[in-house]
Amino acid sequence: MKIFLRALLFVALSLWLGAEFFFPFVAATVFTTLHPDTHTAGQIVGHLLSSLHTLGLISSMVIVVALAAAGSKGFYRPIPALLPIGIVLLMAALTLHSQRVITPAMERDRLAAGGSVDAASETNPARRDFKRQHNNSERVEGLILLLGLVAMVCLANEETALA
């Protein structure tokens, strides 16, 4: 049971972090490949981002349940296990914010800009807000990745402390 919970915990966290790390490279490749058609590239990246968020939310549930179960069985010390649980819950909250607030705002701005942000003038308020929301999205995803790395270090440290 101990090995199963730890493996489940690290697999879920590794999948989420790997996807967060890999996503910018995939997005850049999509935009490079479809360069003249940034609208289609944006739609593809938007769908990929939605999948990333779904993976993150499922992973966060698995991680929290695995950590809670491992803590209750004594596989992790209860107090040190609270830090990664808190970090993962913050990561999930940021993921939800991105999915429920930032992404819909970007879509609203895209439609307000006439369906294609790139076709709108640089002074168009919808285009400017789209760029602002896009920057927020990048910062949020970067913060999720950073927090995930901190959670991983906390868990690795706890593994070392228990050895």
Image (cartoon, helix red, strand yellow):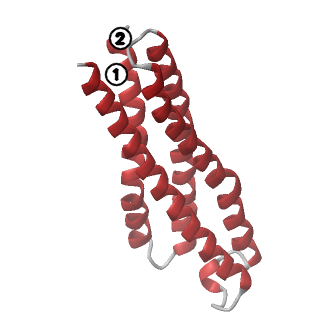
Residue holding disc 2: 2
Q: Is residue 116 visible?
A: yes
Please say if 81 is above or below 45.
above
Disc 2 + disc 1, Cβ < 8 Å: no
Residue that appears at 43% across and 41% down = 16
Which residue is most to the front? Answer: 79
Give the SS element for disc 1: helix
Earlier in the chain: of badge 2 and badge 1, it is: 2
> Label 2 is placed on what type of residue?
Lys
2 or 1: mark nearer the eye: 2
> Label 1 is placed on what type of residue?
Ala
Q: Quadrant of the C terminus?
A: top left
Distance from Cα at disc 2 to Cα at disc 1: 9 Å
Residue that appears at 47% across and 34% down = 83
Residue 81: horizontal and vertical position, in percent? 45, 26
Label 1: few (<14), some or many (≥20) within 10 Å? few
Residue 139: horizontal and vertical position, in percent? 51, 63
Q: Is residue 14 visible?
A: no
Residue that appears at 59% across and 82% down = 118
Could you say which quadrant of the image residue 109 lies in? bottom right
Residue 98: horizontal and vertical position, in percent? 62, 54
Give the SS element for disc 2: helix
Residue that appears at 60% across and 76% down = 131
Label 2: few (<14), some or many (≥20) within 10 Å? few
Residue holding disc 1: 7
Front-lying residue, 95 or 148: 148
Asked if residue 55 lies left or right of residue 129, the reply is left
Residue 60: horizontal and vertical position, in percent? 53, 34
